[in-house]
Amino acid sequence: MKRGMKFIHTALILACFNFGSCQNDAGSTEKDAVIPEPDKEKVSFYYGADLSYVNEMEDHGAIYKNDKNVAQDPFKIFKEAGTNLVRVRLWHNATWTKYSNYEDVKKTISRAKAEGMNVLLDFHYSDSWTDPEKQKIPVAWESQMNNKEALGKLLYDYTYETLNNLAKENLLPEIVQVGNEINPMIMQGDKLVWPIDWTRNSYLINKGIKAVRDISKEKNKKIEVMLHIAQPENALWWFEQATPAGITDYDWIGLSYYPIWSKYTLSDVSVPLKTLISTYKKRLMIVETAYPFTMNNNDKADNILGSGALINGYAATQEGQLAYLKKLKEVVASAGGEGIVYWEPAWVSTTSKTLWGVGSHWDNATLFDNNNKATLGMQFYKLALTL
């Protein structure tokens, strides 16, 4: 998302369709450490969490507590709850923050893999948030924006080098997202250009895919490719246009699904999910979703999900949050989908600054209450333990 960000100023304008090595205390390097490998068997359903914000939150004093109200490493909290996939975003060169860069992402992946969880790496191909309203090219690449061959090489080299560096640390992800919410054409200027130039768009996206495939082959490590679109209804037209344009070598269709920004409800969202799976013969995962457990705002940062995000029958309570996740899992699985990732369940209230204020714009929709104790919503992951 980021969406978080799509809007905040004084009011929320919610209109969207929507990584040198480090030494440990013993003086050895991270790459010397023995990191447990995720389960080798095919995961039947991914119960994921986007933990991109955790390092930053902890640096700003956040202490996370499990369901027994005992302080614990948040990665352990999620692992013990049943989480089997950690998603993490990567920005190219975000000068406005020291997070979501290569070193921060490397730390997150290391923490996830230390707990034996799979990793989904999300390349934004930007210096900041990308989403349906913006796909801003990295500043360092701006001079090549209209030269698709040169830009394609930059994109390929960056993707390849990032993954190659991770390989040296034994930190390759299991899944790579080539772009984030790429409803519009990727790597544009400040103003989005429509319609999509599919000659340019397919060339660039396929360069990213090729980099992943090349690393996967060279390292003899299975890495799956995901393409991510915001909201199921937009995936219908996007993949319909992308396929004849030559974008076919991917494994996963990733979707953001926030009912507030979608025309589909829990009662009928299975329709587009089934259509996408049957039409393109790809695996499908909801890689962003969330639900509020309260309407209270715990800090001065406006929250993204207000009353308009509520669904009849699902109150803004911990019970309502858990019920929403259980129902969505039921719907996604019945449609043939194979995973759900909760977006930023650990973005709790701290003194951390965002582009729009100080605090968290998500503190009412995390999987931790305002005292940083795991909410009932965390029990969603326990479904993975019963399989």
Image: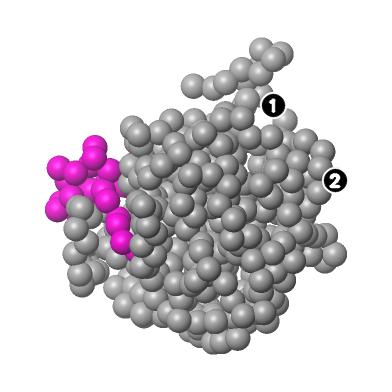
Front residue of 286 and 267: 267
- The magenta stretch is 132-158
Picture residue at 77% right of the left edge, 55% below the top? 82
The secondary structure type at the circle numbered 1 is: loop
Residue 118 visible at all: no
Instruction: Answer with the quarter of the image where residue 32 lies.
Output: top right
Picture residue at 20% right of the left edge, 52% below the top? 189
Amino acid on which the number 2 mark rests in the picture: Lys
Picture residue at 40% right of the left edge, 33% below the top? 97
Front residue of 219 and 362: 362
- Residue 149 rendering spot, x and y as whole percentages: 20, 52
- In the image, residue 131 above or below residue 230: above
The secondary structure type at the circle numbered 2 is: loop
- The residue that label 2 is drawn on is 68
Q: How is the image coloured?
A: one colour
Q: Is residue 142 magenta?
A: yes
Q: In the rendered structure, which disc, 1 or 2, sits on the residue that comes first in sequence?
A: 1
Left or right, 167 with reference to 205: right
- Residue 167 rendering spot, x and y as whole percentages: 54, 37
Front residue of 156 and 232: 232
Tell us which disc is closer to us: 1 or 2: 2
- Residue 251 rendering spot, x and y as whole percentages: 52, 65
Amino acid on which the number 1 mark rests in the picture: Ala
Q: What is the magenta segment's predominant secondary structure? A: helix
Q: Is residue 151 magenta?
A: yes
